[in-house]
Every structure is written in C-alpha cells, then in structure tokens.
Amino acid sequence: MKAEMPNKSYERGINHNYLILSKCSFFGNGVIDEKDYRVRMFLENNIKGLLPVTYRRTDKESRFYYEINSLQSLERVLEKRELGSHELKAIFTGCIRLFETLEEYLLDGAQVILDCDFIYVDIEKLTPYFIYYPDYECDVRQAFTELVDRLLTKINHTDESAVMIGYQVYRYTRNPNFVMGEIRKYIEHMPEKAVPIQEEKTDINYREPYIESAYIEDIYDEEEKSKPKYIGDIIGGIICVIIALGIVGTAVAINIYSPFMLDTGRQASLYGAAIMAFVAGIMFFYDGNKKRKLGKLLDEYEDEKPMLQENENKKPVESASRIVHKTINSEKEEFFYGETICLEESILEEKVLRGRFNGEDINIPLDKLPMTIGKLAGMSDYVIDDNTVSKMHARFEEHDGKIYMYDLNSTNGTLKNGEFVAINTPTRLDAGDKIKMGRVSLTYC
C-alpha cells in the first residue's frame, strides 16, 4: 500500500526558499511528537544527503521547512533531459549512501520520501537531496524499486554505461530481498565505458569481488539469457482471463438452464473467484508489458551502438537559445511567403513576452507551451544569459486558453507587476502585465 503523502506548500523567505510539509490531520490534531528521538535526531544533526530542515508548530499543526535554494525537483528535471551514466550513478549512490548514513543515526529509511516530486537535485550535476519526514512511512524496497522504474524511462539510450547500469539495477531490484549496499558497490566499480566481456575477460567463472552476492546476477551473461522473458506472463494473463470468463459463464448457465439454482453464498464464491482470476490476469499482463519495454530498450541499445563512434566526430548541438531563434525565423518565412490563411478569433491574441536587455530587444513567443526560461542551455527552452537569472527560472503553461507562470524556486524570485509570485504556484497573466526575472524586465502582450 502506498504511503500517504504529507500536505505540501512553498514559501519564499528573505534569503531562502522553502518547501513546507505539514502533517495530514484527518485522524488527529496534526501535531507531531516533538520528543520522538527521530525528530530530535534529524533536526539537531546536519545529515549529509538530507535537505536542511527547521521545525515550526502553529495552530496545532506541525510544519517542517526544507530549504530548496537553487534546487529543482527531480521530476521537473526529468521533463527536460535524459539521464546518462554519471547522472544515474549520482542519484543511485546518493540514495543508497543516505540510507547507510541514517543507520549511523539510528534512523529508519522508511521515513525518506522516494518520490521524484520530493527529491531535489542540483540540475547541473544531479546531486540528489532527500526529504526525511517523521510522520511518513513506506516500504523502502518497494519505494526504491518504483524510483528505479521511473528513472529507467528517462535513460539516454546512446550511453552504453547508462543502459548497463539501468538494466542491471532493474534486474537486481526484481529480487524481493535485494540489498542496497550491493547495488552501490556494483555502481562504484562500474567502468566509465562499457566493454563486452569477450574483449576484457576470458575466464567465464571470473567474478569481481563487489558482485559476489548471491542476489546479483552475472553482468557478463549472454544477452539472450539476461533479457526479460515476457511471453510467459502474457500467456499466464490470457489463461487467467479465460478462467475468469469460464467461471462467470458457468455460473450464469447454471442459473439459467439448470433446475437447481445456486444459493447466494455459492454465487458470491464463484464471482469472487472470477474476480481474483481476472485481477491475476491483469497483473500478468502488467509485468509482461514492463519486461517487453525493457527488452525493447536493450534492442535499441544494441542497434545504436554502431552510431556512438560516428557521433563523436559530429559538431556540438546548438544551444537552446539558438534553436528557439532559429525556429522563430523559419516560422516567419512560412507566414510571409506561404499561402495566406484566415486566423480564428480565438487565436487573434498575440501571446508573447517583450522587453529589452543589454541593448537588445527580447521577444519570447508563447505559442509552444509549456516553456521554461533560464540561463542553463539544455534545461531551458529559452536562454537568457544573465547571472541574476536562475538556471531554471520560470515556466509558462497554458490552461483553458489562458497563460500561467510558475516561479521555479529561483534565487532572485519572479515579480508580476512589482510583487513576488509564489514558488511553484500558477499565476495567471493578463495583457500588459509586467514581469521581472532578476534584472530582466518583460511585458506580456
């Protein structure tokens, strides 16, 4: 069963930005026991890997203020980039080392929220910082497995080491009794570049000391042996569905054609068995689909290996700002020289941010949303090269035909008409609104 998440809000201080978590008070007064040794332990110690936190109690509600200055949620980052081997290593090892550190402080890792919305990272190195919330409790292995599954969907398939790390960690976490420390040892000794075993080792019985655990399979098994088999799951799912339909059909036939009617208890038993068989079928199909996707990922990895060497000789990719400007220019050419079209009344309103900075005009069209503005190319759709603008400063989205702006936990904040907007909270924009990001002033038209 998934643990219930605490209430979440944000607050901007003078020099700090905070993520605020408060106790869910559906069955109580919302107050956490301040004498609990776990609360005192993580509040009074600067535990490496955890977000700095302070505790406040107001109106019979316990609130924990976590400092998130210059950090972004991992979920937000995954929307903008794929993960290479360095990023995967940073996230996995950071998580596992944290659990090992918590043991030294006699704290249980079940209070760590392993949800990408609650994991914050430095968006350049992807160094992770976690939240310890004493009123939260989860199954650590299950939560870590779900985190692994989420990260696997964002792996850069052209990075051989990333694919190998992701696949091996996935295989290892399928064992319900896996040990996280063994995963860390494997990742830390992982070579920077994946090399096939035939080129590196000839003794098939060779084992590195860091993978001697009975739970970790040999990473140098033949590929066909290590690929996930999903056909059996699909067949199992079909059989379960057939059984469920057979039970239902039998019960209906007896009631219609047999002179002996089934009593209520027996009908309930038959229909209950049918539901259980149907649910089992769905679970088989779900597991089979996950294995099929992972097998496809491995196939893509094998297909793309010959392209890696070729890509090394190519020119660097254009920055995000150049790509945006290039796209704008190409669209203008099509507008002026293509066939004239009639605009609908609903799109006559021009949605653009206009301003002037360092002697240059800034025109940021808001026709392709969501869009992120910041100074870090690759993580921002429109780059503003100014040191008062954060790496990921603000995000713009459209809902029901209206434009909304979010401040992405920026250092200097985002102002609308002279007032700071709330962190990670939608703020509606109307024509003529003045927006300021650091030293950059824009007008929404």
Image (cartoon, helix red, strand yellow):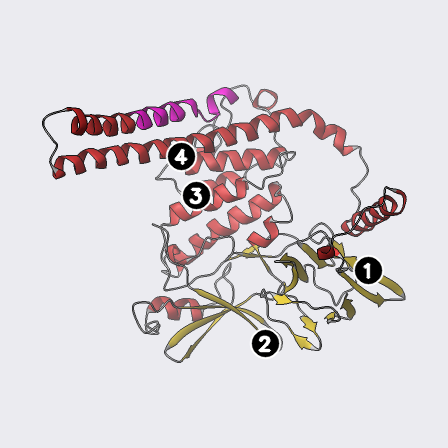
**Front disc: 1 or 3:** 1
Tag 3: amino acid: Thr
Which one is in front, 92 or 259?
A: 259
User: Which one is in front, 206 or 93?
Assistant: 93
Q: What's the CA distance linking mark 2 and mark 3?
A: 36 Å
For residue 13, which numbered disc appears in the image? 2
| Pointer 2 or 3: first along the chain | 2
Which segment is the magenta one?
223-242
Q: Report, in whole angstroms, how far the alpha carbon at label 2 lies from the one at label 1.
A: 31 Å
Q: 308 or 277, which lies in front?
A: 277
SS assignment at label 3: helix
Q: Are marks 2 and 3 in contact (CB under 8 Å)?
A: no
- The quadrant the C terminus occupies is bottom right
Q: Quadrant of residue 283?
A: top left
Q: Which residue is mark 1?
A: 363
| Gap in angstroms between the C-alphas marked 2 and 4 | 48 Å
Q: Residue 104's x, y, as percent?
A: 40, 58
| Mark 1 to mark 4 CA distance (whole Å) | 58 Å
Magenta: main secondary structure = helix
Residue 145 numbered tag:
3
* Image location of residue 55, percent across then percent down: 44, 74
In the image shown, does 67 or 245 lie closer to the viewer? 245
* Label ID, residue 264: none
Q: Is residue 7 magenta?
A: no
On the image, numbered disc 4 is attached to which residue?
Answer: 213
Q: Callout 1, which amino acid? A: Asn
Measured along the vertical axis of the image, is residue 367 above or below residue 161?
Answer: below
